[in-house]
Amino acid sequence: MTLDFSPAIAGWADIAHGALVTVEVTGAALVLSCLLGLLIGIGRLAPQRRFVYGLCTAYLTFFRGTPLLVQLFLLFFGLPQFNILLPAFLCGMLGLGLYSAAYVSEIVRGAIQSIDRGQMEAARSVGMSSGQAMRAIILPQAIVRMIPPLGNEFIALVKNSALVSLLTINDLMHEGQKIISVSYRSLEVYLVIALVYLALTQATHYGLQRVERRLRAGGMVQ
């Protein structure tokens, strides 16, 4: 058996375009997951507010307890039954973002709880409200502690983005499958796709390492 990478080389422009779409959908989902995960994580820290706590817990239970693929299909194939037609890209971004937010929220909650409670008490003793103390004292320290676990979640998000190809989004996986459909060189094309995904995940890992090193150099990490 001989390997023939010529179809992948000939279709490199399509693969590069697919990689760009993968970066776009993953980046948009990343922003959504961070913002929503932060809100849910904070909401899970207030069990005395039963409605908010219950809503956040229900969200967490559903999105962590069901497959991402099913969630994507609910958005793409289920919503049209209610005359809600969303573009494929938006469905992919929402599906990835909502799913990842459930995991980000637990990272946020764990990081905040790892901060010494005495810091909140000290902030309150000098007249700061709970919200002010959270924004000015607790969150800046917690965000730094979130970086390593968030790095793992972001890398998982890049890899999970391959599923959006099933929504007809022209991402990296979808473009590779189109090349395979005319060349029948599955092994070679999938090897190239795997290398591109590896490059994307390594770039994400390297970027987060640089952020963490800068924070350490600035004295923000103890």
Image (cartoon, rainbow, N blue to C red):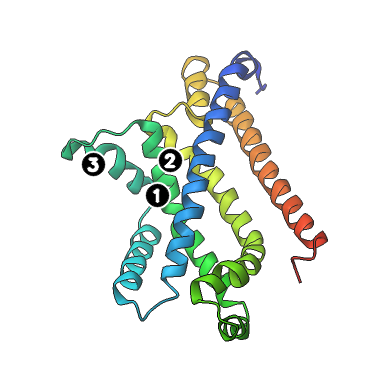
Instruction: Tell me: 164 left or right of 19.
Output: left
**Residue contact between numbered discs 2 and 3, judged by CB atoms under 8 Å:** no
Label 2 Cα crowd, 10 Å radius (few <14 / some 14-19 / many 20+): many
Q: Amino acid at mark 1?
A: Leu
> Mark 1 vs mark 2: which is more N-terminal?
1
Q: Amino acid at mark 2?
A: Met
Closer-to-camera residue (49/20)? 49
Instruction: Tell me: 185 left or right of 6.
Output: left
Label 1 Cα crowd, 10 Å radius (few <14 / some 14-19 / many 20+): many
Checking the image for residue 163, the label placed there is none
Label 1, on which residue? Answer: 68
Q: CA distance from mark 3 to mark 1?
A: 14 Å
Label 3 Cα crowd, 10 Å radius (few <14 / some 14-19 / many 20+): some
Instruction: Give above or below for 63 relative to 56.
Output: above
The residue that appears at 60% across and 23% down in the rendered structure is: 16
**Secondary structure at numbered mark 1:** helix
The residue that appears at 78% across and 55% down in the rendered structure is: 214
Label 3, on which residue? Answer: 78
Instruction: Give above or below for 209 relative to 11.
Output: below
**Residue contact between numbered discs 1 and 2, judged by CB atoms under 8 Å:** no
Instruction: Tell me: 217 left or right of 116.
Output: right
Point out residue 11 in the picture as x, y percentages from the top left corner. 59, 16
> Mark 2 vs mark 3: which is more N-terminal?
3
**Secondary structure at numbered mark 3:** helix
Closer-to-camera residue (20/34)? 34
Checking the image for residue 93, the label placed there is 2
**Secondary structure at numbered mark 2:** helix
Point out residue 98 in the picture as x, y percentages from the top left corner. 41, 51
